[in-house]
Image (cartoon, grey):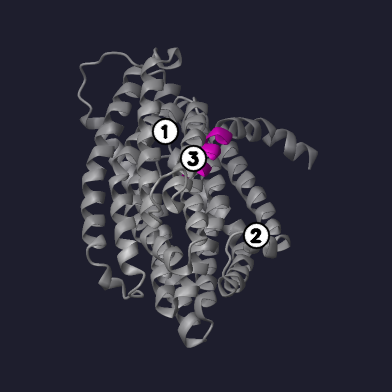
Amino acid sequence: MQVFFQKHKPYFLSILELSWPIIIGQLGIVLMGVADTLMIGKIDATNLAAAGLANAIYYLITILGLGTLMAVSPLIAKAKAENNLEECINYFKAAVLVALTLFVFIYGVNDVLSNNLDWFKQDDNVKPLAKEFLTLLNFSTLPLLLFLAVKQFSDGLSITRPAAVITVIALAINILINYAFIYGNWGMPALGLVGAGWATIIARVFMFVTMLIYVLTHKQYKPYLIKTQAKIKAQYLAILKVGLPSGFQYFFEVGAFATAAIIIGWIGKSEQAAHTLAINLASLTYMVATGISAGTGIAVGDAFGRKNRTDMVFAGKSGIMLGGIFMGLCAILFTVFNQFIVETSVNDKEVQQITAGLLFIAAMFQLSDGVQAVSLGALRGLSDTKIPTVITIIAYWVIGIPVGYYMAFSLDLGLYGIWYGLSIGLTFSAVLLCIRFVKEAKTMNLN
């Protein structure tokens, strides 16, 4: 065991050094949604269900953009390892262009969906509130994508702390504006769910503007902000080639959970509210796993650029182990502090009872969720995204959702059946993606 730890120790430390600021940044972004959910949950179950429906639909489409842009940092890390400064700045420019392209698509689709919520057969009291909130979320997409494009450039250069600090400040801004606009404090009008939407827009604009100013003015980035006459078409296409499959990986996973939210909405308003709360709590641990995933992808991409197979293998395996260890600890916390978490998150007794059961299931799939998330990051570092995308499709849409639907309605397990099905899909994904990384890292041609 000691020999094993000594071999992996430098990789553990390197990935943790890269990952912890990314984790803070990831948590900051998700905590904005969690803060919205918890603060809205204090109003009533109808508003909470509306927030859940709007977020499910919004992230179903928007995650395609977020996942696509996550391919930028490993590509920049590889270019940096090759000492290709021109490639780094061209990837930065291309990332901004990709963000603008993705915004046009995402805004258009979300706009159509926000005006056709009848398609989802939800509670009549929930739909008008969800439409208002979804419309505001849609406006916040542009600053969010642009922030991520700039952040990915910084992360790829292994400068991960600025985005974390900015995101934490934005989280505080979001909470303060929520407090003012949701409840009507400090002389502001009580806007309820709409107030949370405006808070999200303001916080995301702050994130993008502040991050851009920092990158353009700070000396750390000066060696990379060089003038170049080269066209960025090759980098633009490279981001899409690696990033779109990566985006679809997240789309199929988040899409499965969004579809679950819609199906659960057919069961009842309290069930949908409980699902919204439980999935927001589980998303906190998942964001830590995706932070480790991003750090692992950068480390693997750097080793790939140096053509160092040993570092590639050990960095990937170390990241996967870190993700599994962390999520295993979270599973214990969800089990031991189940009632405390639920009772401090929502007032409605029926919603509390349902949420408690869901958190026990969430504890069961934590390990699988962590392993599959970090395995995807390691594979992105190798620019291997096509086969992993196929694996995610099978895991969530051939296994997870169909099995969950069967257990919910044929076995009369209700929303718990949906969650059991998703857990099975996550486990399938974790096993195959982990095997895929080990095989590719050991056998791929580095010439």
In percent of width and height, residue 354 lies at 58, 73
Q: CA distance from mark 2 to mark 1?
A: 35 Å
For the point 59% across and 59% down, which residue is it? 345
| Quadrant for the C terminus in the image | top left
* Circle 1: residue type: Ser
**Residue contact between numbered discs 3 and 1, judged by CB atoms under 8 Å:** no
Q: Nearer the viewer, residue 133 or 119?
A: 133
How many C-alpha atoms fall within 10 Å of the one at disc 1: few (<14), some, or many (≥20)? Answer: many
Q: Which residue is mark 2?
A: 341
What element does badge 2 sit on?
Answer: helix
Query: Magenta stretch: residue 21 in it?
Result: yes
Q: Earlier in the sequence, mark 3 or mark 1?
A: 1
* Circle 2: residue type: Ile
Q: Which residue is mark 3?
A: 171
Q: Nearer the viewer, residue 175 or 265?
A: 175
Image position of 230 with respect to 412: above or below: above
For the point 48% across and 66% down, which residue is it? 44
Image position of 314 with respect to 121: above or below: above
Q: Which residue is mark 1?
A: 73
Picture quadrant where residue 60 is located? bottom left
Q: Is any part of residue 435 visible from this angle?
A: no
In percent of width and height, residue 417 lies at 52, 77
Q: CA distance from mark 3 to mark 1?
A: 23 Å
- Residue lying at the far right of the rendered structure: 2
Q: Is any part of residue 74 visible from this angle?
A: yes
- Residue range in magenta is 19-29
Q: Earlier in the sequence, mark 2 or mark 1?
A: 1
Of circles 2 and 1, the one toward us is: 2
* Circle 3: residue type: Leu
Image position of 413 with respect to 241: above or below: below
Q: Please give left or right for residue 153 compared with residue 431 in the image.
A: left
